[in-house]
Amino acid sequence: GAMQNVYSSQELMINGEVVVGEIPGLLFAAYQGMFAVITPALMTGCFADRFRFKPYLLFIALWLIFVYAPWCHWVWGGGFLAEWGVKDFAGGIVVHVTAGFSALASLLLVGKRPKEDQENSLPHNVPFVALGTALLWFGWFGFNGGSALATGGVAVAAAVNSEIAASVALFLWLVIDWIRLGRPGLVGLCVGAIAGLATVTPAAGFIQPWGALVLGVVATLFCYGCCELRKVFGFDDALDVWGVHGMGGFVGSILLGAIADGSDCAVAADAPAYCVNAGTITRSGEQFGKQIVATVFCAVYSFVVTYVLLRLINLVIPIRPQIDGALDLHEHGETAYNHTPTKAYIPEGNQETKAPSAEVNV
């Protein structure tokens, strides 16, 4: 419909009706733009070192039009899924499922990195992983808490539920790594936190804190299993975008239909005080079924449309670089680290028998 009042001082309106009360239209547009920007960025981590920059820019522009925008409208903008009753509080379907399954589709075209790069899967800088996780975690309060579009109980519930799910998944992922690998690790801890956040995102403003705890446990077991399954199938998803974001958002969106507040919260005017978001969604078999249909439809749609887009782009502009490695230097004439002195790692137990190696430039 016709959109009016995308200004800093008036409420956004469509066909003469206010979209969100007491929020300037320009602020609402900027906030929605943030979701549109972050979603393809999630997907990008999947195909690291295998995508030329020029076709990448074209792909992102087309992907936002043909994948993200339809789902944003269908679920959040009053489209047919919203009218049917499908709910997604802060982007489990719209953001994480679209990005995760689009990332999976991209692997069919871009293929794998060189074998040595796949085998050396450790991050080049663990403190940067921790810093990035901390920044994401902090920003997620804006994603989830901000999706209430107002200060109040719903925003508080969304923020607290996000914290609970992330903390539970962080701890359990750490424990699983400790049991499997014999020692706890910071990287696994960070991945667990992101899995918890992605899984709780579609439900954050609709569930009680106990539901967030349940989703934290489910996120750990389900996403950890998906990341291991990805290795079995040989998919070279560099940052486990599908296993963590895609499948986390997938299972969280479905389980929302089973762990939302009960039927006594269906009518806002008569709802008890404990209801998180009365008058929006209640758990039931019917709601559970709707969430399954919408989530599966989104996964299939995102996968298929992304694959078609990449195939068409590749006919015009080759996507895969002609060289393996040094992509930053080849595409942009730059490298991440030009003057970083490093020392060779000395295995445990050899400190007394081996002298430190000379500094080298990476």
Image (spheres, grey):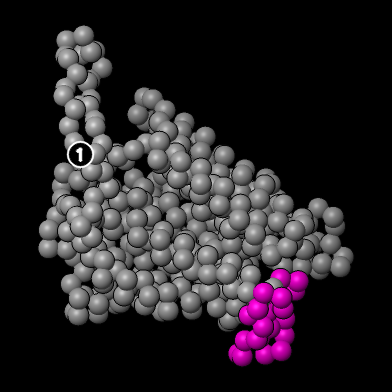
The reply to whether residue 334 is in sight is: yes
The number of callouts visible is 1
Q: Position of residue 315 (x, y in %)?
A: 19, 79
Q: Give the farthest residue toward the front.
A: 339
Which quadrant, please, contains the N terminus?
bottom right
Q: What residue sits right under mark 1 in the picture?
A: 362
Judge left or right: residue 332 versus residue 177. left
For the stretch drawn in magenta, the main secondary structure is: loop
Evaluate whether residue 20 shows in this view: no
Q: Quadrant of the C terminus?
A: top left
Q: Magenta stretch containing residue 7, yes or no?
A: yes
Q: Residue at x 71, y 71 (%)?
A: 23
Q: Residue furthest top?
A: 352
Extent of the magenta region: 1-23
The image shows residue 172 at horizontal and vertical percentages of 50, 36
Q: Quadrant of residue 6?
A: bottom right
Vertical arrangement, residue 273 with respect to residue 170, above or below: below
Instruction: Determine which quarter of the picture holds residue 43.
Output: bottom left
Foreground residue among 95 and 52 = 52
Instruction: Give 140 or 177, whichever is nearer the viewer.
Output: 140
The 10 Å Cα crowd at callout 1, few under 14, some 14 to 19, many 20 or more, is: few
Q: Is residue 296 magenta?
A: no
Q: Is residue 323 left or right of residue 285?
A: left
Q: At 54% from the left edge and 47% from the top edge, which residue is drawn?
A: 137
**Residue drawn at 14 percent across, 55 percent down:** 324
Image coords of residue 148 (percent x, y) = 68, 62
Q: Is residue 234 above or below residue 294?
A: above
